[in-house]
Amino acid sequence: MIKYLYASECGKSIPAKGVKVRKIRFAAFFAILLALTLVFAGCQNGQGTTEAVPTEQSIEQPTESQGETLPEGVPEAAVLQSGLTQVFKTFNGEAESTALDTSVLESLSLMRGGFIPKIEPIVPEELSEEAEAEMDRAMRAYTRKDEDIIVNNSEFFYFYSQLDDEAKDIYDALELFAHDPTSTENIVSVKISSDPRTEEFVTKFYLCQTALSYDHPELWWMYPWNGSVDFGAYIGQSEGGKNVIYFQFTTPYETFERDVTAFNEAVEAFLDDIDTEQLPRTVAKEIHDKLIEMAIYDQAVLKENRSDFAHTAFGALVANTEGTPHYCVCDGYSQAYEYLLTQVGIPATVVTGMAGNAGVDGGMGGHAWSLILLDGKWYEVDSTWDDFTDLKNDVAANYSPSSVEYQVYMELLNDEAHMEKIQHYMYLLMTDEIENYKAPEDLTYQTKNGMYHVQLVGDSERIRFCDYEETKDTFQGAVTRLLPQADGEIAEGFEDETEDEPETDEPETDEPETEKPTEKATSSPETGKYQSIAGTYYVSSYNGYGEQILRAYYGNDYYKQLSMFTLNADGTGVLLENGTSTPFTFQFDGTYLQMFGGNGGSLIMAYTGGGFLMYDNYWNIYIFSKMK
């Protein structure tokens, strides 16, 4: 049985980014310790003593006591066999599995989709002649009182480069206007040829405002979904065949200086830890990793469907509107990532669209992610979906440390190698990869005791707004229509960044060419890093009953009817169970042997010095000893 965890995205219940947990054997990890205790206790009960590992010759010797009445507690042969059979059926992927109890996790919204609230189009208000004259007077009279504290060291503004001339004029006016949001007397005008009363102009206006916000995340109060600062657009009288548009703040940004100073300090502190003299690829990854470590997904903004500073770079690097540090949603992640990259000379921009788990009806929600340019090529990055860093807090807050769920999830979250993959699974992808993402098998985590498979990452979809039926004709579609594809090709204008290495002429020589020896791809079964444990193992003890008793009552070759396995030094092996042969691979860390079957099943055995301990689904304990 496979059970999905569910998360809320844009007010809809969807499978939590493919999260699924599958138990592949009964019993908990601590049973190994219990089993060890039981075995060693049983070895002292007078019937089973700790014996030397038998030789092949001693195993084949006949025993006179075969067929005697079984002592009390010694199981029938069929019982002895059935437990192992069930274990290895699970190992081979044949047994029914049982899911973890995920009732608490289902309410955590662990996997974060993105979120962009809807906005209603606003047609600019038409002014009377008297009102326009007053706007002109105020604009002429206005003078800035403070030194500009806004910082952007980038030389790359992607969206501006894609706009037509009229759109650039609107963009320029909005940028000039944005530099003092503290006063309603700050009025800026721009002349346009378009009719501002049309839907086409409204689309163009929002295109310019959004393009400015994505090129300049340091002007977060200009982003349509900032939730705190508003401005109005007004239509003036036509002059020489052109229309005049005025911009005026209607809700002054009263904490502007404080917030901009905090933002600048946060950016400086963030980049202080980054060695920007490294290769751009290294810098981009370090910024990505530090950002997801810092940022916390703002579930309240998601659930309440509200505009907020959480949608901005300020939310990610400083705080949301309520002042909660580093709380943001997807557009906050992506704008912060873009701004940090562009400040150190790495071109980047923002992508918007719909995202959700693949094949889930109604599971798509508004989302934002990133495009970055490295070595002249565009790549897509979704830092929001890469962020699993605060999952530990969620698990700790909702599960008892003694619960299986707590232990399983904490084991996964503390596995650095696995988390390295999980937290970069949406990093540096091509557009076609991220649009129809297929989770590879190596992103499924297997617990060290072999009992559970945990899948935090599943298949997902991303559709740019320009390709989404409901938004392709809106300003959001117009914005994303300007974006490049990440297709592995060198971006236009960056051809010189990745020149091919010059060819070198090989010196001519009269000596005949000799074929160089090639290294073996893998070690042979006889050699390898597991040489110390290589060999064939058989059942020598069952619940404390030693090999001598088992041979006496079930025959010298009883183990052939139960189970044997061969470990090769190169990490491969063969299981002989109930007349069948199954290949497997294994890993050994000095304490535990993990065996992996071809169908995704696995099991674990504890090393006992000369052999391995295993328990079946009924808490019966087996010792496998090495043949000599």
Image (spheres, rainbow, N blue to C red):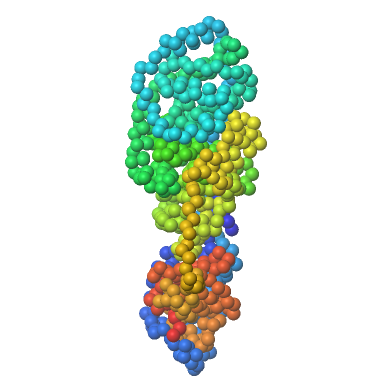
Which residue is at 64% across, 44% downward? 361
How many marks on residues? Answer: 0
Q: Which image quarter: residue 96? A: bottom right
- Locate the C terminus and report the quarter of the image it occupies: bottom left
- In this rendering, the answer to whether 381 lies above or below 509 is above
- In this rendering, the answer to whether 482 lies above or below 66 is above
- Asked whether 194 or 399 is in front, the reply is 194
Q: What is the x, y in percent for residue 517?
A: 48, 73
Which residue is at 44% across, 11% downward? 140
Q: What is the x, y in percent for residue 463?
A: 60, 41
Q: What is the x, y in percent for residue 556?
A: 51, 88
Q: What is the x, y in percent for residue 474?
A: 62, 30
- Asked whether 562 or 488 is in front, the reply is 488
- In this rendering, the answer to whether 149 lies above or below 348 is above
- In this rendering, the answer to whether 625 lies above or below 10 is below
Which residue is at 39% across, 24% downward? 256
Q: Which image quarter: residue 328? A: top left
User: Could you tell me if residue 498 is visible in this image?
Assistant: yes
- Asked whether 166 or 247 is in front, the reply is 166
Q: Which image quarter: residue 77? A: bottom right
Which residue reaches farthest top? 130
| Image-based side of 339 in relation to 163, left or right | left
Which residue is at 50% across, 37% downward? 349
- Locate the N terminus and report the quarter of the image it occupies: bottom right
- Asked whether 69 or 499 is in front, the reply is 499
User: Could you tell me if residue 299 is visible in this image?
Assistant: no
